[in-house]
């Protein structure tokens, strides 16, 4: 047991060192890129340092949805399912949460109403995730493509809602948004970070991480997820039901995505509007991959990307550097991570050569 | 509904299907060679931007825009090819990265090169005039084929070219061999990496041209995220078309028809929200995807091949 523990710690350290090197490489590349196009090369690094020191509030605000998105991805990834539809499920969650928040009785207790709103959002997210999951399980439809297509449907659905049934008709101008939510459904912001919109969504994200980590390492479902992911045939022989497991992970993933929607609506926007989601779902893939799909690691990588995002936004506001550079950094990070398989191959080849030489 | 209306609608179907057709042909070649390429979206976005950039710099020359877009699309796809072949990157993740990079890069370059945000319309643009086909243009219904853009005819010719290359030449045989069994292909002396480089670069050029069509022929400007999921729709069309050039082209026409009908409904003043109408092609794509996966025989080998690859790579 002790030995196992040591090995786990050594592995974790190993991965951490490797990923930190990756981050440094991609930051250097991005800085060179900035320099070549005539901006201040170190702007992005400064932005991150700022985001982790003086402007930590903004980082906390962005870290919450990013951590949750990372968790939504890592749950499915372990089962070898790709949920690229987190963005769509998030929108559906936001829509359901808003709809419920707008009809709740005025004087209801804040905690109770928030729980109801979040439950509605999670159910909506999970249900929307069921479409690709059922298609995959029963018709063998590739979930990568179906979830990507469903994202566009969700975006258009929100567009329809805020221009039609849920449009704020009291507003004088045409805002393309729903009515403002009643205050008893506003998720509290962290008073320490006022006036920023950093909210207790961050705590929620940490709690969800603990739940997911417990699920992975201490429950039968966690074991099943890993088995189904690594060897579905063996899993079936062992009496597991891979189809059921896939449905379960997609439901969990969709529910987490719905939760992001609820947080964004109840804590940040306070109303449903189009385009409030800057592709959290795709960012979640980067967050999860950087953490090697480890739920505990997701928190740290979520905070890192939170600072990157926050840094990028500040950078654009204060200097001339476009914030799109953060997306470039993210793309570089994930493409280099996806290429990580080169090293073991080289090692294997080296071993082979050595063996042959003897 | 009279003949002119039908002909108009078919003409707009062909116009809408053109970029899809080009993208799908690129995706099809990759699929046949066992590369799961959903980066079509990103390649096209780069093409759309490059076309407008070239038009702006050259003072309105659309020909240069089209050429430049195809070139930029191919160069951009080379990054994907490098990671997928040389570094054995997971195809899906590399595709996502390429799409993300395209979004970031185009929005960044918009600021860095032209100092604008969101969109750019070139100061001057000499649109290419459409080609009118002498006899065809007088035949009712069929006259929808006349008066289309040069890119449309190019796309149609490419369907035939891809068909011939894929099924009648050695190159095509090699592509399919690599897609079916890398080991068998290698035993036969085919270099899988070389074959994959070729198909990915070709798909990049096709997608670049498709993007250029969107930004210089459909409209005359570039705006952020202007590809709007067409790359994913094209990929679905390819899956539904069983990675066969002719069937795939027909499926893109079907998607184009769905869009064209949507536009008709919107114009007809029916009280239906435009957002709902815009969902139509996506719903159709999902239905098509479900059908093609259900009817097992239409299941493309490439998709399963890519999955097997993924497990192997991750393990």
Image: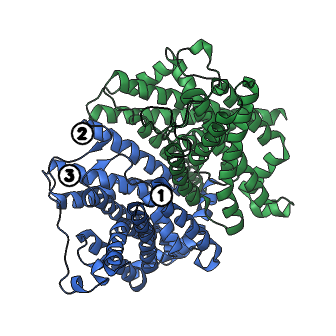
The chain letter for the residue carrying disc 2 is: B
The chain letter for the residue carrying disc 3 is: B
Q: Colour of chain A?
A: green
Disc assigned to residue B54? 3
Up-down relation of residue B116 to residue A140 (above or below): above
Residue A62 in the image, given as x and y percentages of width and height: 54, 29
Residue A15 in the image, given as x and y percentages of width and height: 62, 37
Q: Is residue A356 left or right of residue A46?
A: right
Total marks shown come to 3
Cα separation, mark 2 vs mark 1, equals 43 Å
Pointer 2 and pointer 1 on the same chain:
yes
Q: Nearer the viewer, residue A353 or A273?
A: A273
Cα separation, mark 3 vs mark 2, equals 12 Å
Provide the secondary structure element on which disc 1 rests.
loop
Provide the secondary structure element on which disc 2 rests.
helix
N-term mark: 3 or 2: 3
The answer to whether any part of residue B183 appears in the image is no
Q: Residue at x 79, y 40 (%)?
A: A215
Q: Is residue B94 left or right of residue A85?
A: left
N-term mark: 1 or 3: 3
Q: Residues within 10 Å of mark 2 (few under 14, many from 20)?
A: few
Residue receiving disc 1: B271
Residue B142 in the image, given as x and y percentages of width and height: 30, 83
Q: Nearer the viewer, residue A19 or A273?
A: A273
Residue receiving disc 2: B113
């Amino acid at each position: 047991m002790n030995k196992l523990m040591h090995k786990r710690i050594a592995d974790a350290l190993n991965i951490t060192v490797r990923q930190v090197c990756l981050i440094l490489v991609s930051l250097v590349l991005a800085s060179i890129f900035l320099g070549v196009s005539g901006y201040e090369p170190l702007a992005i690094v400064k932005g991150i340092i700022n985001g982790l020191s003086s402007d930590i509030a903004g980082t906390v605000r962005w870290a919450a949805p990013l951590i949750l998105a990372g968790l939504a991805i890592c749950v499915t990834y372990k089962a070898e399912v790709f949920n690229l539809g987190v963005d769509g499920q998030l929108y559906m969650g936001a829509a359901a949460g808003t709809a419920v928040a707008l009809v709740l009785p005025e004087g209801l207790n804040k905690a109770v109403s928030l729980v109801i709103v979040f439950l509605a959002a999670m159910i909506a997210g999970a249900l929307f995730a069921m479409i690709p999951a059922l298609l995959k399980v029963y018709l063998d439809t590739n979930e990568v493509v179906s979830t990507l297509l469903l994202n566009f449907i969700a975006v258009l659905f929100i567009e329809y809602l805020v221009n039609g049934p849920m449009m704020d008709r009291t507003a004088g101008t045409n805002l393309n948004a729903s009515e403002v939510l009643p205050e008893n459904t506003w998720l509290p912001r962290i008073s320490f970070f006022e006036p920023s919109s950093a909210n207790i969504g961050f705590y929620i994200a940490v709690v969800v991480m603990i739940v997911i980590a417990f699920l992975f390492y201490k429950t039968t479902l966690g074991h099943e997820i890993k088995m189904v992911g690594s060897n579905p045939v063996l899993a079936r022989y062992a009496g597991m039901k891979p189809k059921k497991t896939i449905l379960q992970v997609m439901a969990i993933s969709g529910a987490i995505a719905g939760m992001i929607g609820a947080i964004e609506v109840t804590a940040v926007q306070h109303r449903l509007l189009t385009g409030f989601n800057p592709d959290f779902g795709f960012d979640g893939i980067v967050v999860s991959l950087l953490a090697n799909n480890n739920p505990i690691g997701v928190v740290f990588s979520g905070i890192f990307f939170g600072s990157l995002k926050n840094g990028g936004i500040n950078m654009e506001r204060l200097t001339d550097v476009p914030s799109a550079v953060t997306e470039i950094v993210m793309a570089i990070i994930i493409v280099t991570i996806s290429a990580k398989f080169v090293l073991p191959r080289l090692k294997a080849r080296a071993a082979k050569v050595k063996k042959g030489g003897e | 509904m009279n003949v002119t209306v039908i002909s108009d609608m078919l003409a707009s179907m062909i116009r809408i299907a053109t970029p899809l057709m080009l993208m799908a042909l690129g995706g099809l070649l990759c699929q046949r060679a066992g590369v799961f390429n959903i980066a079509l979206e990103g390649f096209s976005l780069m093409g759309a931007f490059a076309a407008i950039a070239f038009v702006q710099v050259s003072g309105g020359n659309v020909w240069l825009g089209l050429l430049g877009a195809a070139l930029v699309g191919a160069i951009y796809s080379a990054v994907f090819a490098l990671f997928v072949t040389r570094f054995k990157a997971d195809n899906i993740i590399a595709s996502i990265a390429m799409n993300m990079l395209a979004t970031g890069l185009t929005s960044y370059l918009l600021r860095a090169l032209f100092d604008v945000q969101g969109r750019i319309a070139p100061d001057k643009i000499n649109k290419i005039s459409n080609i009118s086909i002498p006899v065809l243009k007088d035949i009712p219904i069929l006259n929808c084929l006349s008066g289309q853009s040069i890119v449309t005819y190019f796309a149609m010719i490419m369907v035939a070219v891809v068909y011939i290359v894929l099924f009648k030449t050695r190159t095509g045989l090699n592509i399919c061999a690599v897609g079916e069994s890398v080991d068998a292909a290698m035993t036969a002396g085919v270099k899988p990496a070389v074959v994959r480089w070729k198909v990915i670069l070709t798909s990049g050029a096709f997608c670049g041209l498709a993007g250029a069509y969107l930004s210089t022929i459909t409209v005359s400007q570039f705006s952020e995220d202007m590809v709007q999921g067409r790359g994913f729709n094209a990929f679905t069309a390819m899956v539904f078309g069983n990675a066969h050039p002719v069937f795939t082209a027909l499926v893109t026409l079907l998607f184009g028809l769905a869009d064209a009908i949507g536009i008709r409904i919107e114009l007809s003043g029916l009280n239906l929200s435009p957002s709902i109408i815009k969902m139509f092609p996506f719903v159709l794509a999902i239905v098509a995807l479900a059908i093609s996966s259900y009817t097992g025989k239409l299941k493309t080998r490439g998709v399963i091949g890519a999955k097997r690859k993924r497990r192997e790579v991750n393990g």
